[in-house]
Amino acid sequence: GPPHSSHAPKPTSPSDAAPITDEVEISEAGRLVDQARAVPEIRQDRVDAIRVQIAEGTYETPEKLDTAVERLLDEIG
């Protein structure tokens, strides 16, 4: 072509462009809030009953200790 002609850059079509994506980042505080919401409600009546049993020395029985050991072994094994 002539020495003074210019070529305009070819416009990119939408199919050539990278797709637009959204990104969400949850903060550590947000994760802690989610974990706190996942904790079951405290059954105060049950807690009080167990405290009384512990104070009286009747809470820890061989059966309960066996159950606790079995659950622990299941969890780590």
Image: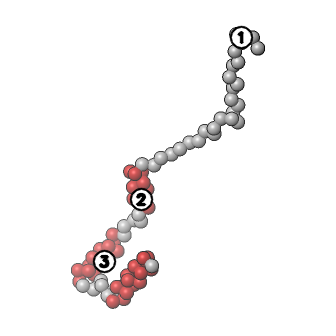
Q: CA distance from mark 3 to mark 1?
A: 96 Å
Label 1 secondary element: loop
Mark sitting earlier along the chain (1/2): 1
Residue occupying the point 69% across, 19% down: 8
**Circle number at residue 49:** 3
Residue type of the residue flagged with mark 1:
Pro
Residue type of the residue flagged with mark 3:
Ala
Compared to residue 70, the image places residue 40 above or below, namely above
Compared to residue 40, the image places residue 49 above or below, namely below
Quarter of the figure with the N terminus: top right
Q: CA distance from mark 3 to mark 2?
A: 27 Å
Q: CA distance from mark 1 to mark 2?
A: 70 Å
Image spot of residue 22 (x, y percent): 56, 42
Q: Are marks 3 and 2 in contact (CB under 8 Å)?
A: no
Nearest the viewer among 52 and 2 is: 2
Nearest the viewer among 32 and 43 is: 32
Image spot of residue 28 (x, y percent): 40, 51
How would you rate the neighbour count of disc 3 (Cα within 10 Å): few for under 14, some for 14-19, many for 20 or more?
few
Q: Disc 2 marks which residue?
A: 35
Residue occupying the point 68% across, 22% down: 9
Label 2 secondary element: helix
Q: Disc 1 marks which residue?
A: 3
Image spot of residue 40 (x, y percent): 41, 65
How would you rate the neighbour count of disc 1 (Cα within 10 Å): few for under 14, some for 14-19, many for 20 or more?
few
Residue occupying the point 51% across, 45% down: 24
Residue that protrudes farthest toward the right in the picture:
1
Where on the picture, by quarter, is residue 68? bottom left
